[in-house]
Structures are given as structure tokens and as C-alpha cells.
Amino acid sequence: MRLTLQVWRQPGPASAGEFVRYDAPDITEHMSFLEMLDVVNDRLIREGKEPIAFDHDCREGICGACGMMINGVAHGPSKGTATCQLHMRSFSDGDEIWIEPWRATAFPVVRDLVVNRSALDRIIASGGFISAPTGAAQDGNAIPIAKQDADESMDAAACIGCGACVAACPNGSASLFTGAKITHLGLLPQGQPERYRRALKMVAQMDLEHFGSCTLFGECQEACPKDISIDVISRMNRDFLVAAVKEREERSVAGAG
């Protein structure tokens, strides 16, 4: 098939960007979207031109490195699919495809389709961990965990931190990401010691990173390549409110003493 690409090109964070048109002939339906970009880049390099910069790593939908807006949709038209898993069979011969980076205040453009997503790393560093001691692995049945809790925890842990939820949200909120990280630890016994402190710290860090507020628009769960439900946002909000009340009570007791 032959495609027309309109690709966002931006030399650096302080530079102005623009859409640049590229012809993409000889594209097969069996290529992934990133393989299609590889073919375009090979031709650009042969012509002595700058290749298109884009994030990628595992190309198996695991690492979360890839991510771009494709025709205005995070990760493209296929639901529950990362950009690296999107295949060109989702498009037709002669299509025009618009490709641009994640658009969010907290994700500044580095170059072309590459954005800086380190804000998500800082949210994790603020509280996305447990204090369980290291050592030999325990027997799988040593700590009984209800199946529903285990299933919900695993569903939340599927988050790959790609940032599609932020890019798709009209408010630029990271609540689905943060909620998933809080939920997958908060449902397990190992995550209980830091459960409420974790919610306070991670939500506070999310605000410091200039992510927008969540209004439960729901576009985040539609864009998520792992189909994570906005139920995790409700759990995050509940833990945060409980944590805020506990903190206020502790301060009152300390003040009275």
C-alpha cells in the first residue's frame, strides 16, 4: 500500500515544530506501525535527511516506551493496543495518517515524536514501593489473598507507564496511571504498611508535576493499551481521603499533647 504521512517534526524543546509531509510507498499490511516508520527513516537516511525521532524499545507492548497520537488517537485506532502492536492492516491504501507526540504540559517534547515522561517516574519514586524485606521467595500460599483482590491487583499492575492516559485526557491528568500504581500495591498484604502514606505522597507528586485534575471523563481507559479501568481512580481517591483524615487526626493528637 502507499500512504501519506503528516509527521510532527520539532528539532528540540525550544524550537518551533510543524507537520511535514512524507510519502510512504511499498508498505505491507504485515508491518507494525513502528516498522513502517523504520522503512520511512531508512529512505530518509539514504537521502541524507534527518530521520524521524520516536520512542521504542521492546516492541512487544511490555515496556511502555512507544507512544504517539495517530490520527488524533493515543496509540492509534485499535483498542487495547500499544503503538508497537498496531499493524498496518488497520489502514487502507491511499490513507493519510497524522502522527504527533503526546500533548501534555507534564510531557515536554524532546524531539519530533519523543517526549520527556520522567514525571511518571517521579510519581513512582515518591511512594510506589513497599517495605517488605528482601530474601528468599516465600511459598506462594504463605500469605492468603482473596482471588478478587489478587485479580484486581494484577489488572492494575498491567500498567506499562506509557502515558497514553495523560495524552488522551482533555485535562492532561495522570490519575489513571497513579491510581493503577496505588491500587496494585494497596490491594496486597505487602502493601499495607505504606498504603495511606503512599496515596498522600503520590497524589501530591502528581500535582507538583503539573498534571491536570481528573473529572472522570473516561477517555483515559479508552486509550489505555492494557484496558485498565477508571475504577482504580476511585480506589486512589478513597485511599487519599482516608489518608488525609488520618493525617489530620494525628496532627490534632500531637497538638493536644
Image (tube, rainbow, N blue to C red):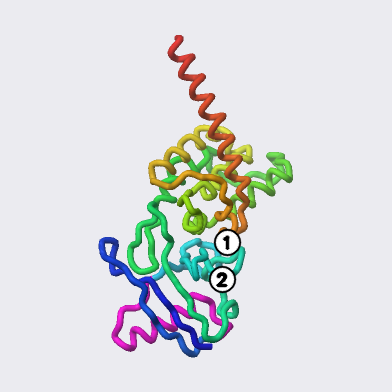
Q: Residue drawn at (54%, 69%), measured in percent from left and top?
A: 76
Q: Compared with residue 27, is residue 177 higher up or lower down, i.e. above or below?
A: above
Q: Which residues are magenta?
A: 28-53
Residue 178 magenta-highlighted: no
In the orientation shown, which residue stands out farthest toward the bottom?
26
Q: CA distance from mark 2 to mark 1?
A: 9 Å
| Mark sitting on residue 85 | 2
Place of residue 49 in the rendered image (x, y in percent of width and height, measured from the top left): 30, 82
Helix, strand or loop for disc 2: helix
Q: Marks 2 and 1: CB-CB under 8 Å?
A: yes
Q: Give neighbour class at mark 2: few <14, some 14-19, many 20+ (Cα, 10 Å).
A: many
Location of residue 18 (image quadrant): bottom left
Q: Is 100 left or right of 215, judged from the image as shown? A: left
Secondary structure under tag 1 reads loop
Instruction: Tell me which numbered mark, 2 or 1, is placed earlier along the sequence.
Output: 2
Residue 33, magenta (yes or no): yes
